[in-house]
Amino acid sequence: MMKPKFIISGGGTGGHIFPALAIADELKLQLPQASILFVGACNRMEMQRVPKAGYPIKGLWISGFDRKNMLRNVFFPLKLIWSIAQSLAILIRFRPKVVIGTGGFASGPLVFVASLLGIPSILQEQNAFPGVTNKRLAARATAICLGSEAAQKFFPPHKVHITGNPVRSALQKPLSKAEGCERINISCEKFTLLVLGGSLGARKMNQLIYAHLEDMQRHHIQIIWQCGYLYASDYQHLSSENITVLPFIDDMAAAYAAADVVVSRAGALAISELCLVGKPTLFIPSPNVAENHQEKNAQALVDHNAAKMVVERNADTDFWITLQGLVEDEALRKTLAKNIQSFAHPNASKKIVSKITQLIAND
């Protein structure tokens, strides 16, 4: 086979970027001669994260449609037209065999133009309630790989494949707590709490952690706190011997390994990773998402005694009581860890790449 070329497009948040990187890593593993190009949105986090992972990326001048502030959409039509022209130029120049879209602003124009040029495309949808981009592209996609069975009703049945969500390849190799703590440079003798509010950060989660720092210190809890890029200046100064505050955690394999309990948002990527690593988790779903899908994601695990959940509207009263219960009950932690791991999809990347290679074989 000639050197196959692929374009992977998606981004805006880690929930779109890291599944894209996991697919790229698996492609390189199965097809070592493959040439992979990423396409993202200019000035979004993929423009830094993707090159750091070792892949080239091109940026489109595109952004989402702001439904809350219509004045911000003045340049949206121009951006859309320009990004379609950019996508056409990239596709003609690179000539990929398959285009893979993982959601986010940039995947829209790229997958749309690929369909006009007759280039096969695969969508990867992480959430139970799909994003706007993937729903609009569904009619033009060749195949759609879903992280959740609940998303099937939004897509043409004959295109759908349930694969689970791909997670970062580093998480497939389990580390001991001692190895994780050593890599992060924290004590492995202490009970460790990992706080994950997403790549940009979660204001309410940060406020809850800050409000209960003294309670945690009384329980001798060591904290790894990802506060998010938006809140780094508010909380990073709190770092100390027992508190490590970071805007973003690069070595997630080490962070998960070090953690005894995790407090997390309930996005699709976070859930997929926590299922894989099997950590007792307290979810605080974001209420600022379409169809309240994060709460539904978490509830599915809570119903199977695979996680705990506190909703934001009750968090001021329920958060510390629930977290303290997890910290003090080792048997509960073991039960949650065992049950959440039963929801893992460790072969999601392999299944998606299998669909991609089928498209090449049929070409």
Image (tube, grey):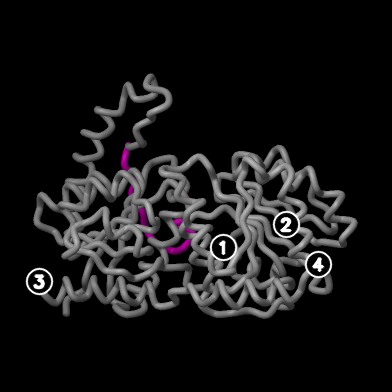
Residue 311 lies, with reference to residue 279, above or below; the image says above
Structural distance between the alpha carbons of marks 1 and 4: 19 Å
231 to the left or right of 58: right
SS at circle 2: helix
Front residue of 343/117: it is 343
> Is residue 186 something one can see in this rendering?
no
The three-letter code of the residue at mark 3 reads Asp
Q: Position of residue 294 (x, y in %)?
A: 49, 51
State which mark lies toward you, 3 or 4.
4
Q: Earlier in the sequence, mark 3 or mark 4?
A: 4
Q: Position of residue 94 (x, y in %)?
A: 20, 57
- From the image, tell me which residue sits under label 4: 328
- From the image, tell me which residue sits under label 1: 302
The three-letter code of the residue at mark 1 reads Val
Q: Earlier in the sequence, mark 1 or mark 4?
A: 1
Return the mark for residue 322. 2
Front residue of 57/340: it is 340
Structural distance between the alpha carbons of marks 1 and 3: 44 Å
Q: Position of residue 290 (x, y in %)?
A: 41, 43
Residue 251 lies, with reference to residue 79, above or below; the image says below
